[in-house]
Amino acid sequence: MIKKAVMACILALLFPYIITMAWTGKIEEKKEFPAITSGKKIILDRKSGETYMDVEEYLPGVVAKQMPADYGREALRAQTIIARTYIYGKMKGQNEVKESELHMEYLEEQQMEKLWGSESFVASYQAVENAVRSTTKMVMMYDGKLIDPLFHRASTGKTRAGDENHPYLQEVACPRDVEAEGYLAMTAYKKEDFAEKINQISGDVPVKADQIPGSIQIVLRDEAGYVGQIQIGTKVYTGEEIQRVLGLPSAAYSFEEYDEGIRVVCQGIGHGYGMSQYGARCKAEEGWTAEQILPYFYKNIVLISE
């Protein structure tokens, strides 16, 4: 009886693999690709000691964290070029850089599997790996220099223009960004709670609950809808300061009186500069390649293999 029970348990565990074998003739496994070396290395400081990893080997763990694997081949390729450009920029002309200096999140394979789930892990990993391999050593340059490849998840419907240090960042339309999950966020506060949060930002004169929302004034808002400066009470804050203290997904927000309190309506996800990842996904769905997507978001750049 015990033997039969044990056999039944074993068969139950093996059933998915038996079905896979019967259907495809093999069990799907993550393909192992031959190593690609760029000659540029990341210095890793792990518990086991200091080790090196080639940039091309390191990139899948970065891209897996930065962009959903189901955003499509060309969007992933664009994101890979962005990540590589950023890493090369941090190297400052050298052939190596410490991982701690990158300030990038990196996923080990076990973390990728947890993120994507066991069923999607193989396909997702191969999508990211293929994006890296198909863009090997490719980076973006402007006027002979590596660019600062800013990116965000979704714009307000158009991206933001950069400053004099980012002339390649210009406003571009991303009309389908409004379809992105989390594009519109609304949060209601009691006046007292709102004032308490604002007062977490240091100031000589604290904001009082009875000043909300009457004393709120948007001083500066850019063409894409992001707040540059905002006055609350007697103090002027940057749009990003209020975004951070309220935990908003972007600085493109407005306020309205709501149920004897205040409601914040926020559009977009991220700072709005550079490539909109959701916009890139939409372009990829329309048949654009990474080589077409990137110049759309970063004007007058050149793609080269370093």
Image (spheres, rainbow, N blue to C red):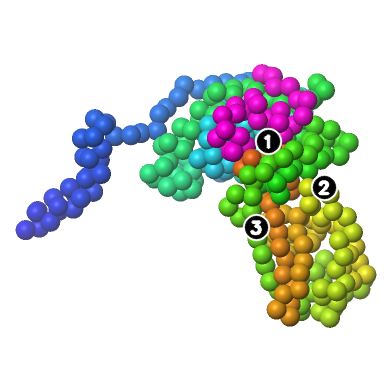
Label 2 vs label 1: CA separation? 38 Å
Q: Position of residue 269 (x, y in %)?
A: 67, 51
Circle 3 Cα neighbour tier, 10 Å, few/some/many (<14 / 14–19 / ≥20): some
Left or right of 4 in this view: 265: right
Circle 1 Cα neighbour tier, 10 Å, few/some/many (<14 / 14–19 / ≥20): some
Left or right of 145 in this view: 133: left
Q: Amino acid at mark 2?
A: Glu
- Tell me, yes or no, if residue 44 can be seen here: no
**Nearer-N-terminus badge (3/1):** 1
- Per the image, label 1 sits on a secondary structure element best described as strand
Circle 2 Cα neighbour tier, 10 Å, few/some/many (<14 / 14–19 / ≥20): few
Label 2 vs label 3: CA separation? 18 Å
Q: Amino acid at mark 3?
A: Leu
**Nearer-N-terminus badge (2/1):** 1
Left or right of 300 in this view: 277: left
* Residue 138 sits in quarter: top right
Residue at the image position 47 percent from the left and 40 percent from the top:
109
| Tag 3–tag 1 contact (CB < 8 Å) | no
Label 3 vs label 1: CA separation? 38 Å
* Residue 281 sits in quarter: top right
Q: Position of residue 292 (x, y in %)?
A: 65, 26
Residue at the image position 23 percent from the left and 34 percent from the top:
23
Q: Amino acid at mark 1?
A: Lys
Residue at the image position 50 percent from the left and 30 percent from the top:
129
From the viewer's perspective, is the residue at label 2 or at label 1 nearer? Answer: 2
Q: Which residue is mark 3?
A: 184
Q: Which residue is mark 1?
A: 98
Left or right of 204 in this view: 35: left
Residue interval drawn in magenta = 280-306
Spot the residue most to the left: 1
Q: Which residue is mark 2?
A: 223
Residue at the image position 72 percent from the left and 70 percent from the top:
263
